[in-house]
Amino acid sequence: MNDKTPYNDLPLVPTMVAMVVVDNAYTGQDISEASRDQKRIAEVEKRRQRMTDPMRQEFIWEVDQRCQDAYDADAKWFKKCLKGDKGRDQLYIWIAHWLHAWLRRAEPKTPAIIGKK
């Protein structure tokens, strides 16, 4: 018999956390203070601001899938995220980190040259 709470009934809703993360300025909170580079943070924030609604939805869906998979697998990091305010805060950091990586992956490496001669 499994007494595990169904993922959709958890008090912590990763999709809501993801929505907050994509709607707020990226500040580099997922990077250690010693490694924070303001230029890099500004570039990630610029990319976040350029996110379209479909991009936001795709990211939020990916976060939910990642968290559901972690929950189903009893991943230790996700279990910690379910424990009180500190856990919730840690999930915000994870999702900010994923957003940072997602934006770097989603953005073209070379600028568009359409209309330039």
Image: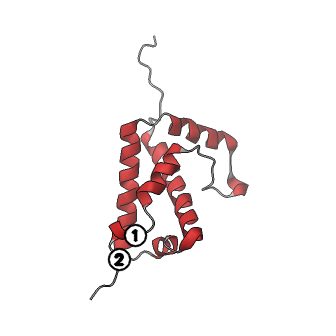
- Toward the left, the furthest residue is 1
Q: Please report the residue visible at 56 percent of the width from the left and 45 percent of the height from the top.
A: 24
The numbered mark, 2 or 1, whose residue comes first in the sequence reads: 2
Residue 73 placement: quadrant:
bottom left
- Toward the bottom, the furthest residue is 1
Q: Please report the residue visible at 42 percent of the width from the left and 41 percent of the height from the top.
A: 106
- The quadrant in which the C terminus is found is top left
The x and y percentages for residue 37 are: 68, 46
Q: Coloring scheme of the render?
A: secondary structure
- The quadrant in which the N terminus is found is bottom left
Mark 2 → mark 1, Cα distance in angstroms? 7 Å
Q: Please report the residue visible at 39 percent of the width from the left and 41 percent of the height from the top.
A: 55
- Secondary structure under the numbered disc 2 in the rendered image: loop
- Secondary structure under the numbered disc 1 in the rendered image: loop
The x and y percentages for residue 36 are: 68, 50
The numbered dot on residue 5 is 2
Query: Which residue type does callout 1 highlight?
Result: Leu
Badge 1 density bin: few <14, some 14–19, many ≥20, Cα 10 Å: few
Q: Name the residue under label 1.
A: 10
28 w.r.t. 87: above or below: above
The x and y percentages for residue 59 are: 40, 48
For this rendering, which residue is in front, 30 or 108? 30
Badge 2 density bin: few <14, some 14–19, many ≥20, Cα 10 Å: few
The numbered dot on residue 101 is none
Q: Do the residues labelled 2 and 1 touch (CB within 8 Å)?
A: yes
Relative horizontal placement of residue 23, taking residue 34 as reference (left or right): left
